[in-house]
C-alpha cells in the first residue's frame, strides 16, 4: 500500500479527508452495480430466457451470504481502525492476519455447504424445473469461488481501516473490466451459458483479491503481510465477530424482508414488477452515497475513539451527515429531474415509466432518513457498539416492513401502499437509533467527567 493513499484520520480538518475516503467508496459501489448489470446483459443478450432466469434466481441466496460476511469484514475494519488509533501496531498486524484466515476458512465452509445443498436450496425457493439445472450449475460454481469473494471483502476492509479506499477501487476496476471481457469470451466466443458467466465472476474476484494481497505483501506499514504470521489470534477473532456478526445478520435479515416486499410487488403483475426493477436499478446510486458516508463514519470514529479523541468522533458524525445529505440531495435531484428518460432506458412502456417514477419519488425523497440511520449506526459501530444499532434496525426496518405488508397492504393493495413502507421504516428506525445514540453519548460524557 502506498503511503500517500492513506489518510491521517487523527489530525487536521475532517471534512476534506472524509470526502477523500467516501468518494472512492461510492464509486466502487456504482462500478460493482454496473459490472453486475453487464453480467446479466451478456446472458440476456446471448443466451436464452432460462439462462437469464437461472442467474436471477440465485440473486437472493448469493445476497444473503455476501451480506453476512460483508458485515463480518466490517468488524475487522473497526478493530483494525481502533488499534491503529491506539498506536498498537502489533495488534493491528495480528488482526490483519487473523482476518484473512477468517475469510479463507469461512469461504471454504460456504463452498462445501453450497456444493452439497445447492439443489435443495433452489428447490426450496420454487425455482421452475426447466430452470433448476442451470440455477444449480451457476450456484455451485459461484459458491466454489467464495474463498476469493470473501477474501476481497476482508482485504478491502483492511485498506479502508487505514483510510485507503482508492486501492480497492483501482483493483475492482481492473477486475471488473476483466470480468466483462471473460463473460464475452466464455459466452460468445466459447458458446457457454451460465457456467461461463459464473466462472468469469469467480476469476475476476480472484484477480482483485490477488492484487490487494500482493499490495499488502509489498506495503511497509502495520498492515504489511508476513507469511510467518498467519496464525489465528482467538481473542481478536472473537472481537471481530462480536462487532461484525450483528452487522452481517442485519444485512441478511434485510434481504429476507425485501424478499417479502418483492413478493407483494410481484402480486401486482408484470408491469409493476418491471417498473419496480427499473426504478431500483436507478435509485440504488443514491444508496451508494449514503453507504459510503456511513462506512466513513465507522472508520474515522474507530480510529479516533482508539486514540481517545471523542470530540473528533462527534465532528466525524456531523461532517458525514452534512456531506452525505448534500451528496444524496444532489444525486437524488438529478435522478428525479431526468426520471422519465432514465427509466426509458430500461423500458419505454409509458405505464412502466409512470409506476417507476412513483417509486423514485417516494424512495429518493425519503433517503435523508436512511442517511441519518446509516451514519448514526456507523458512528456507534466505530465505538464498538454494533449490536444495538443492528437490533434497532431489525426491529424498526424489518418489523415495520413485514407488519405493513402482512397487515396493511391486504387492505389497500396498491403499489403506492407497498413502497410507503420504505420511508416509514427509515423514519421509525432513525428515530430509535437517534434516541439510543444520544443516551450513549450522555453516558460517555458522564464517564469522561468522572474519570
Image (spheres, rainbow, N blue to C red):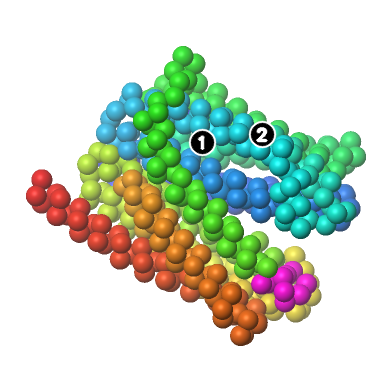
Judged from this view, the residue extending furthest toward the left is 450
Magenta run includes residue 270: yes
In front here: 398 or 97? 398
Which residue is rendered at x = 26% and y = 62% of the image?
438
- Distance, label 1 to label 2, CA atoms, is 20 Å
Q: Is residue 177 above or below residue 414?
A: above
Query: How would you rate the neighbour count of disc 1 (Cα within 10 Å): few for under 14, some for 14-19, many for 20 or more?
Result: many
Q: Residue under circle 2?
A: 112
Where does the image place residue 58, in percent across and percent down from the top left?
Answer: 72, 50
Where does the image place residue 141, in percent across and percent down from the top left?
Answer: 74, 37
Where does the image place residue 302, in percent across and percent down from the top left?
Answer: 33, 43
93 relative position to 192: left or right: left
What is the magenta range?
Answer: 264-274
The disc placed on residue 142 is: none
Which residue is rendered at x = 14% and y = 55% of the image?
446
Query: How would you rate the neighbour count of disc 2 (Cα within 10 Å): few for under 14, some for 14-19, many for 20 or more?
Result: some
The disc placed on residue 154 is: 1
Q: Secondary structure at mark 1?
A: helix
Which residue is rendered at x = 34% and y = 27% of the image?
91
303 relative position to 30: left or right: left
Q: Judge depth for marks 1 and 2 and give the one in front.
A: 2
Q: Is residue 295 above or below residue 224?
A: below
For the image shown, how many numbered marks are present on the structure? 2
Q: Is residue 296 above or below residue 255?
A: above
Judged from this view, the residue extending furthest toward the top is 228
Magenta run includes residue 225: no
Task: Tell me the quarter of the picture where residue 392 sits.
Answer: bottom left
Q: Main secondary structure of the magenta part?
A: helix
Task: Tell me the quarter of the picture where residue 229 sits.
Answer: top left
Q: Is residue 380 above or below residue 270?
A: above
Amino acid at each position: 500500500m502506498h503511503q500517500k493513499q492513506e489518510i491521517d484520520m487523527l489530525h487536521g480538518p475532517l471534512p476534506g479527508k472524509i470526502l477523500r475516503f467516501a468518494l472512492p467508496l461510492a464509486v466502487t459501489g456504482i462500478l460493482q452495480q454496473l459490472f453486475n448489470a453487464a453480467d446479466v446483459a451478456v446472458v440476456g443478450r446471448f443466451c436464452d430466457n432460462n439462462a437469464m432466469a437461472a442467474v436471477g434466481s440465485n440473486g437472493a441466496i448469493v445476497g444473503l451470504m455476501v451480506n453476512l460476511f460483508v458485515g463480518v469484514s466490517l468488524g475487522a475494519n473497526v478493530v483494525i481502525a481502533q488499534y491503529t488509533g491506539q498506536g498498537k501496531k502489533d495488534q493491528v498486524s495480528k488482526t490483519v492476519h487473523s482476518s484473512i484466515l477468517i475469510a479463507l476458512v469461512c469461504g471454504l465452509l460456504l463452498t462445501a455447504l453450497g456444493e452439497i445443498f445447492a439443489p435443495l436450496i433452489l428447490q426450496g425457493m420454487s425455482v421452475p424445473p426447466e430452470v433448476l439445472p442451470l440455477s444449480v450449475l451457476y450456484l455451485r460454481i459461484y459458491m466454489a469461488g467464495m474463498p476469493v469473494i470473501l477474501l476481497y471483502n476482508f482485504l478491502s476492509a483492511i485498506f479502508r481501516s487505514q483510510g485507503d479506499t482508492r486501492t480497492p477501487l483501482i483493483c475492482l476496476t481492473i477486475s471488473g473490466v476483466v470480468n466483462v471481457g471473460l463473460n464475452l469470451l466464455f459466452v460468445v466466443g466459447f458458446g457457454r451459458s451460465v457456467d461461463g458467466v459464473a466462472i468469469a465472476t469467480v476469476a475476476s474476484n480472484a484477480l482483485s483479491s490477488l492484487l490487494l494481497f500482493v499490495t499488502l505483501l509489498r506495503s511497509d506499514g502495520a498492515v504489511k503481510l508476513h507469511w510467518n504470521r498467519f496464525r489465528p489470534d482467538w481473542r481478536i477473532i472473537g472481537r471481530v465477530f462480536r462487532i461484525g456478526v450483528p452487522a452481517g445478520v442485519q444485512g441478511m435479515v434485510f434481504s429476507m424482508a425485501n424478499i417479502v416486499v418483492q413478493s407483494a410487488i410481484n402480486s401486482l403483475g408484470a408491469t409493476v414488477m418491471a417498473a419496480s426493477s427499473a426504478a431500483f436499478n436507478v435509485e440504488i446510486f443514491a444508496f451508494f452515497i449514503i453507504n459510503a458516508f456511513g462506512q466513513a463514519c465507522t472508520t474515522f470514529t474507530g480510529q479516533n475513539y482508539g486514540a481517545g479523541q471523542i470530540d473528533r468522533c462527534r465532528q466525524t458524525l456531523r461532517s458525514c451527515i452534512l456531506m452525505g445529505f448534500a451528496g444524496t440531495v444532489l444525486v437524488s435531484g438529478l435522478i428525479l429531474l431526468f426520471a422519465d428518460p432514465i427509466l426509458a432506458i430500461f423500458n419505454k412502456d409509458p405505464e412502466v415509466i409512470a409506476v417507476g417514477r412513483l417509486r423514485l419519488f417516494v424512495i429518493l425523497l425519503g433517503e435523508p432518513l436512511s442517511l441519518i440511520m446509516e451514519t448514526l449506526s456507523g458512528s456507534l459501530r466505530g465505538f464498538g457498539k454494533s449490536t444495538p444499532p443492528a437490533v434497532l434496525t431489525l426491529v424498526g426496518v424489518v418489523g415495520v416492513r413485514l407488519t405493513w405488508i402482512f397487515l396493511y397492504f391486504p387492505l389497500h393493495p396498491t403499489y403506492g401502499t407497498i413502497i410507503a413502507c420504505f420511508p416509514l421504516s427509515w423514519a421509525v428506525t432513525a428515530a430509535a437509533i437517534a434516541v439510543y445514540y444520544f443516551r450513549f453519548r450522555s453516558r460517555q460524557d458522564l464517564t469522561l467527567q468522572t474519570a
